[in-house]
């Protein structure tokens, strides 16, 4: 049974609220005004909460964070009003351009009852936040340029062997040879032969993991055409997605 008279101080309110929201949330109380600018600058609101922050200084606040990175800002209502203002915080890992054209999931004012506040958040603010953040990350994905040839390495099946065009970079070649690829200088390729496709796929995955640390993606596909003299060679793609289910072509 809920306590009919819960503690309504900000820190306690936020802690109880975190336990009532769906999912796993933590609550962090920020009592020092010196570190609040970073938090308030991320408030994703153009309505009631933004207006309150513009007119009244925030002396302390709380931030709720769920395991998936969703964050909520909690502050006291300004003046002598009872209750709290709660708003979503914008995701920090999206470029500013990704927010263009996305409607803010404006915050809400709630009574000093964490249980009823949790219901309002679950059925009002959080659904609007999910829609907005989906649009932001969809925009961010469209803004992300496709990897250039120089950042890709493609491996292809040929007569039972995995074949890779010889990379321009010595460190990429070293990664391949470290995992069993052998240079065929006459053809200008590296090959990983053998009858055990599971072993070949494991080697391909290991290559992909190593190359990803070098900023190179990897895939299975058709080998690139050999460049004519004097032209820019097609960069060797990477091997990140070679899986045991890869089939010979």
Image (tube, helix red, strand yellow):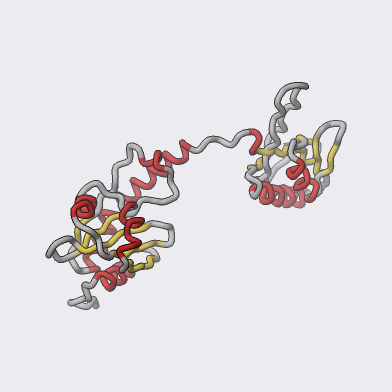
Task: Choose top left, top right, bottom left or bottom right for residue 2.
Answer: bottom left
Quadrant that contains the N terminus? bottom left
Left-right relation of 167 to 51: right
Left-right relation of 11 to 157: left
Left-right relation of 182 to 246: right
Task: Choose top left, top right, bottom left or bottom right for residue 229.
Answer: top right
Residue at (35, 61) in percent of width and height: 35
Residue at (32, 60) in percent of width and height: 36
Residue at (75, 37) in percent of width and height: 167
- With respect to residue 122, does 190 lie above or below? above
Q: Where residue 94 appears, x then y in whole percent? A: 43, 46
Extreme-left residue of the structure: 80
Which of these two is toward me, 223 or 197? Answer: 223
- With respect to residue 18, does 5 lie above or below? below
Q: Where residue 196 appears, x then y in whole percent? A: 79, 49
Which of these two is toward me, 235 or 66? Answer: 235
Q: Where residue 29 appears, x then y in whole percent? A: 33, 68
Quadrant that contains the C terminus? top right
Q: Where residue 47 appears, x then y in whole percent? A: 21, 48
Left-right relation of 176 to 124: right
Task: Choose top left, top right, bottom left or bottom right for residue 73.
Answer: bottom left
């Amino acid at each position: 049974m809920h306590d009919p008279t819960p503690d309504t101080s900000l820190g306690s309110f936020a802690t109880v609220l975190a336990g009532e929201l769906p999912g796993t949330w933590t609550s962090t109380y920020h009592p020092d005004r010196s570190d609040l600018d970073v938090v308030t600058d991320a408030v994703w609101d153009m309505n009631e909460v933004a207006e309150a922050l513009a007119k009244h200084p925030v002396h302390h606040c709380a931030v709720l964070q769920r395991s998936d990175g969703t964050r909520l800002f909690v502050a006291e209502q300004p003046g002598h009003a009872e209750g709290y203002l709660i708003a979503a915080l914008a995701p920090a890992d999206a470029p500013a351009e990704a927010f263009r054209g996305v409607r803010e999931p404006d915050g809400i004012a709630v009574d000093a009852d964490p249980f009823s506040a949790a219901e309002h958040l679950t059925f009002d603010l959080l659904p609007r936040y999910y829609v907005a953040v989906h649009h932001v990350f969809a925009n961010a994905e469209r803004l992300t340029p496709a990897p250039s040839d120089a950042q890709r390495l493609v491996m292809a099946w040929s007569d039972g062997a995995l074949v890779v065009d010889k990379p321009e970079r010595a460190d990429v070649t070293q990664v391949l040879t470290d995992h069993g690829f052998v240079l065929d200088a006459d053809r200008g390729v590296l090959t990983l032969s053998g009858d055990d496709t599971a072993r070949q796929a494991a080697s391909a995955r290991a290559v992909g993991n190593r190359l990803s640390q070098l900023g190179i993606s990897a895939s299975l596909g058709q080998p690139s055409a050999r460049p004519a003299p004097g032209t820019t060679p097609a960069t060797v793609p990477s091997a990140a997605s070679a899986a045991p289910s890869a089939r010979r072509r």
